[in-house]
Amino acid sequence: MQSQLLPKQFWVIGGEYLDDDFHDIDLATSTVHGPFHDYDEANAVWRERSMETKSQHHMRYAIVVSAPNPRGQA
């Protein structure tokens, strides 16, 4: 079987968390940005969102990497 690389997609996700351990996010504040085709693009958005909310103790954002399902199923 021939190995084929799947394109990665990068997403910036985050919002306000309800606890100090950052386990439970307030779904009313959650946001998803992307997909981005490279890490640098996602990192720029992550940095922008993080800087805009740095004084808000319970706000946090992260970069998540995904690849399309090779079988075309969700």
Image (tube, grey):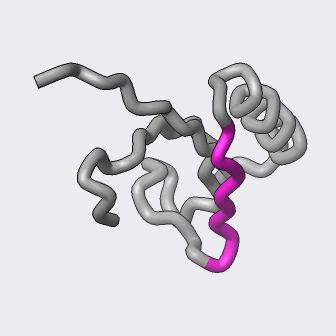
Q: Residue at x 71, y 27 (%)?
A: 43
- Residue sticking out furthest to the left: 1
| Image position, residue 73 (x, y; %) | 29, 63
Residue 60 in magenta?
Answer: no
* Nearer the observer, 29 or 68: 68
**Residue 47 higher or lower than 59, as above or below:** above
**Residue 27 higher or lower than 48, as above or below:** below
Q: Main secondary structure of the magenta part?
A: strand
Q: Describe residue 19's horizontal placement relative to residue 44 as left or right.
A: left
Q: Describe residue 72's horizontal placement relative to residue 38 as left or right.
A: left
Q: Residue at x 47, y 36 (%)?
A: 65
Q: Residue at x 80, y 28 (%)?
A: 44
Q: Residue at x 52, y 65 (%)?
A: 25
The segment highlighted magenta reads: 28-36
| Image position, residue 59 (x, y; %) | 68, 51
Q: Quadrant of the N terminus?
A: top left
Q: Quadrant of the C terminus?
A: bottom left
Q: Which of the 4 quarters of the picture holds residue 30?
A: bottom right
* Nearer the observer, 72 or 39: 72
* Nearer the observer, 72 or 30: 72
Q: Describe residue 55's horizontal placement relative to residue 19 as left or right.
A: right
The number of numbered badges drawn on the structure is 0
